[in-house]
Amino acid sequence: MTLKLKNPLAFFDLETTGINISNDRIVEISIVKLLPSGERVTKTQRINPQMPIPLESSLIHGIYDDDVKDAPTFKEVAKSYAAFLEGCDLAGFNILQFDVPLLVEEFLRVDVDFDPSKKKLVDAQKIFHLMEKRTLAAAYKFYCGKELLDAHSAEADTMATLEVLLAQVERYEGQEVVSTRGEHLGKVANDVAALHEITASNMVDLAGRIVRNDAGTEVFNFGKHKGRAVEDIFSQEPSYYDWMMRGDFPMDTKKRLTEIKLRGFNKK
């Protein structure tokens, strides 16, 4: 089929130095502009982010510092991309949460006008999540081929979950699990320890505000310090600990924060 378009629809994707919209930078941009006539125009380019590319990011997208050292900076190409996207609506996968906000940040830094509020935005990931439900009933139907009767009664949900897990292990046993960030989490096995490693090994607090990174270091998983070591932040910005302890965070999160803070004191 062909899409019915009034304006060109620009599908785009960014490879970046990381996932922090405020601080990270583009290292590659690719746009496929679909015209109302059905013609496609592609524009792909690597960008010098003017900052080191973390190894964990390079391992995901395969772009290293040497690959972009002679590439133009975003400032040097920003106007040409703004012109290329002029009059276009935007589309992509997860663009609402990541690609559009980060692209706008890059344009703002170099003082180039780019206003997405004037464009229609189409996110294929959101359509996917809306149409392919991620509920227990949907999982029960998918893995077990059964309708979940009495959904939301505790016993029915519990029994269905047991059957779903059994079916998942049977279906995926021996297969490597890779996260959306490209991290290899291990293989599915008929073993609870292995399943824990896949689903919960990086958790520090139950609310997911603190996780362990690839090196096993506890890092914040939200806010302005996302991805940064908790101990480092408490050392550099002691008031952040006080703010969290006064804030509306779960008691379990506060307990873990206190353990990390006390551990830092004991190192001194």
Image (cartoon, rainbow, N blue to C red):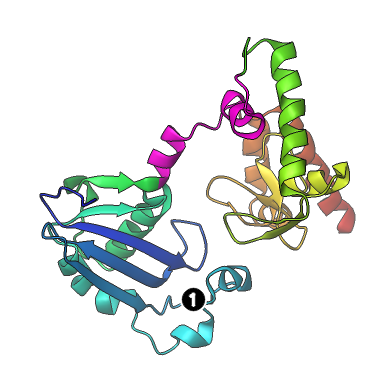
**Where in the figure is residue 91, as x and y percent of width and height?**
29, 52
Q: Locate residue 35: give its quadrant.
A: bottom left
Q: Which element is circle 1 on? A: loop
The residue where tag 1 is placed is 51
Q: Residue at x 50, y 31 (%)?
A: 133
Q: Quadrant of residue 45?
A: bottom left
Which residue: 18% across, 68% down? 84
Query: Does residue 261 appear left or right of residue 237 in this picture?
Result: right
The one nearer the camera, 81 or 110, is 81
Residue 90 visible to an observer of this rendering: yes
Q: Quadrant of the C terminus?
A: bottom right
Q: Main secondary structure of the magenta part?
A: helix
Identify the residue at image location x=26%, y=77%: 77
Q: Is residue 251 visible?
A: no
Residue 64 percent location from the top left of the image:
54, 80
Q: Residue at x 63, y 57 (%)?
A: 228
Q: In this view of the protein, which residue sits in the foreground, 244 or 120?
A: 120
The vertical placement of 245 against 79, above or below, is above
Q: Position of residue 86 (x, y in %)?
A: 14, 61
As drawn, the residue found furthest toward the front would be 145
Whether residue 235 is in magenta: the answer is no
Q: Amino acid at mark 1?
A: Met
Q: How many numbered discs?
A: 1
Expressed as whole percent of the image width and height from the top left, the position of residue 92 reads: 35, 54
Residue segment shown in magenta? 125-147
**The image quarter in which residue 253 lies:** top right
